Amino acid sequence: MDSNGSSLHRSQSLASGLEKTSPSRTKPAPSHSSSTLSSPHSRQIIKDWEVMDDLQAEIQTGSENPEVLTTPGRCEGYLLKRRKWPLKGWHKRYFVLEAGILRYSKNQQDVSRGRVQGSLDVSLAVMSINKKSNRIDLDTGDILYHVKAKSHELFYIWVTKLQAHRLYKKNKTSFVHSSLLQTLFHTSSAGQAHGNGDLSSAGTEDPAGRSGVPPSASTAVNTKVSAWLRQSHDPDTCVQELNRCDLDLSELNRLIQRLQALETGHTFTNGDLQRIISIQNLSLEKPKKLKSGKIRGHSRTLSRVEALGMPIRGISKSLSSSHLSSSAHLGASVPSIPDYVYSQLSPPTVLTPEGKKIQQDICAMSLRVLASLKSVHETLSLERQKLQEAWEANNLHQPNLLDVPAPSLGPPSVTDSAAEYFDASDNLLWGSSSEVSDESGLSDGSTTNSEPEEGHASTTRKYRASISRSPNNVVPKSTGRRTTLPAPCPDNSHVGLMAILYNNIGKDLARVSMPAALNEPVNLLQRLCEELEYSELLDTANNTPDPFQRMVYIAAFAISGYTTATFRNRYKPFNPVLGETYECIREDRGFHFISEQVCHHPPISACHAESENFSFWQDQRWKNKFWGKSLEIFPTGMVNVTLSRFGDHYEWNKVVTCIHNVLSQQRYLEHYGEVTIQNLKNNVCTCKITFVKSRYWGSDTNKNEVQGTVLDQSGNVIHRFGGFWHEGIFCDTLPMPKCIWKPNPQPKDYLLYYGFSTFAMELNELDPDLKPLLPSTDTRLRPDQRMLEEGKVSEADKKKDEIEEIQRVRRKELAKRGQEHIPRFFKKAKDSSGRDVWLTTGTYWDLRENPGFASLDNLTLW
Ligand SMILES: CC(C)CCC[C@@H](C)[C@H]1CC[C@H]2[C@@H]3CC=C4C[C@@H](O)CC[C@]4(C)[C@H]3CC[C@]12C
């Protein structure tokens, strides 16, 4: 087991960093792993936070219980929504909860205009509440909302409504699911067909249902559309258009119902309609009286089934020819049954003026929906064509210029700066939740200004296009290092993380052994070295006389350290044991690097690298917050770089990394927040980099987006750059605008090898010439990690337990003697701002040289 523990291995990391609940104490979130546990259904209360019970869908396959599908009432109103970044604080937003979906807009007008800022399926969310502060948190794994009600009353209303909608949506989904299964597998007997074999009734029965499409089907469509949009360059307009469409459709639904009510004097819901049709189909009689609905319709199934020539028992019986011919009012020319029913519903009376008005509205609205869909279709076709062309062009021509001509974006301006792109016009609520007491003092969000966002979206698109046109780095000539690992990674999808955490409730997770199959064969000391994969950017910076341009390269370097996250979310690095060290000499890159695990509580890894051009150091530690499905990592500690030629000392912070869906196989990483790079030598220039948080459910255009500006002393924007941390960075304000950084292409079969880059593959390589020179504490000599690398997973597992036991014994002995562990190559100091930092003692390379680690006393770690 890992005793030093990264976030997921220690109750300390998981629970102490937690404001509220450790995952082991909540009900298990619906895990996608095979070892999901049964829900304990207990409401856990930790520090005023309660995690609401996991709702069990009440509909069982084959059961017939339409009551549980009654749509709970719509709930809407203003709530405060917390935003961490950008523009941190509580913002007043208008929320609408309908049919299990929670949407929000800036204000009520925006809702009617169809400007939805975000939406979330409440049945998929872990819901935690804090009664004291009226707070509700919803975490779906992908989306995380922190909201707060203004009063206790409102809070209770929202909690009750949310629970009702969660239950409703869960039931509905499982109902549709079982219906779908039955339809697909065609197993329905007549009775079942009445009950829930009817897809269309399941889909349309809900008056708030937007389009009559079953939720499962619409989810599938959404997934497809968003997957497509992810690849497309111009989806913003599509998303807006589709959001508008969505709202128009619900409005249409409402209008139609009103019209029906008006003309027949009775309000028919879609459900009523279905039931009427259903009764008609079975009895072929005019509806005498609407029974309050226990009978589930299947007329559409019937017509579809008939069309497909599929007989269904019971139904075909009721439609026997003798029955048909004996039906007095149907006669020889039998009108279609639904037509008949509709004709009963809308008698051919002359429309009232109000009815006419509604009809006109329906026509206008329908035309709008049609126009929207047409425009979406056009945009998508165009995008497809563009992509096709780009793809073909890319395959035909090999670009040979490194510098790509800049897109004409105009000079940088402060209005264009990243800080202003997002919700520029928001009125903010600064400060902590307790400071917010009076809603009257809040923004009603009525001022909207979408212009900067649109401008921003097009700039981003241009950056992306320029980056993709830039050639990849020249593949370096063989370095003589390995290009693959000895064994492919083990499949760990069967390891139920939730089960591990849940089975160890109450225990210090540092004492819980985690299977080695969850690990990747590098550790956190080596991952620090991985941040130097693009060290050539620091070399370039040291050869760039202009301080502003120099800063652009430093910024690109700071961003490049995050790119490994793209493919590295399935495994976690080994936790170094206290006193473990790692060295890395890269003659080809001109640097040598060392790192050491310097502290156990909290775990701190310190590192230092030297080259002709630069020095690089940092000590890495972080805090976690677990929200039920996602885990946020807040690194503390600063990164430092000095450049030899100019004597610059750059210092910057790190952003938040969020592991979305941490307990499931759909896990992925997102970085968000702002980095400020300062030059401690002088304040000629500073740099601000923004890691954009993905915001809209359907829009992936800004996924992994990064924007940055280099500012002079008076805050003027001198350079701007942007792009994506997984694709590259383009700067259009340099004398020769260019792509300043692009990740190296991944090696062949990288997915079989933990998603490692070539550089990562090389980290744990143990050259026979190197072996005698290493101190025995070097990670390369750590046996469990080596075993894992070689594919010996169960041996690695056993060894890992042993190593952790050795560390425990050593710690106890030290404690007994009243001693503290003293790191060997790093010492604690204070930086210029008074923060604790770990700096190199500068002795490693000298000792290595003379007398050599073999003749020195080294700690025995394994
Ligand atoms: C259950 C398992 C397999 C989940 C996998 C967890 C992985 C993805 C987690 C565990 C520890 C995490 C790392 C911890 C600390 C940092 C430093 C931060 O500045 C950048 C992100 C980075 C580098 C994290 C990336 C994600 C990470 C590697």
Image (tube, helix red, strand yellow):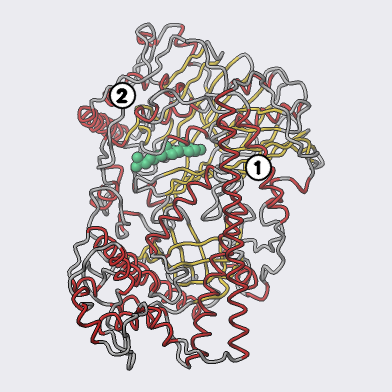
Front: mark 1 or 2:
1
- Residue type at numbered disc 1: Thr
Residue 700's spot in the image, x, y percent?
A: 54, 48
Q: Secondary structure under badge 2? A: helix
Q: Is residue 696 above or below residue 130?
A: above
Q: Nearer the viewer, residue 285 or 726?
A: 285
Q: Is residue 295 visible?
A: yes
Q: Is residue 150 above or below residue 380?
A: below
Residue under the image location 61 percent in, 68 percent down: 367
Dot 2, how many residues are within 10 Å of its Cα: few (below 14), some (14-19), or many (20+)?
many
Quarter-wise, where is residue 409 in the image?
top right
Quarter-wise, where is residue 717 in the image?
top right
Residue under the image location 41 percent in, 87 percent down: 344
Q: Is residue 54 visible?
A: no
Residue 757's spot in the image, x, y percent?
A: 45, 25
In the picture, the disc for residue 211 is: none
Q: Which residue is mark 1?
A: 460
Q: Earlier in the sequence, mark 1 or mark 2?
A: 1
Determine contact: label 1, label 2, CB under 8 Å.
Answer: no
Q: Nearer the viewer, residue 164 or 66?
A: 66
Location of ligand 1 given as a quarter of the image: top left
> For the residues marked 1 and 2, what is the alpha-carbon distance in whole angstroms?
40 Å
Q: Is residue 72 left or right of residue 817?
A: right
Q: Is residue 69 left or right of residue 366?
A: left
Q: Nearer the viewer, residue 803 or 78?
A: 78
Locate the C terminus and report the quarter of the image it occupies: top left
Total numbered circles: 2
Q: Which residue is mark 2?
A: 789
Residue 673's spot in the image, x, y percent?
A: 58, 46
- Residue type at numbered disc 2: Glu
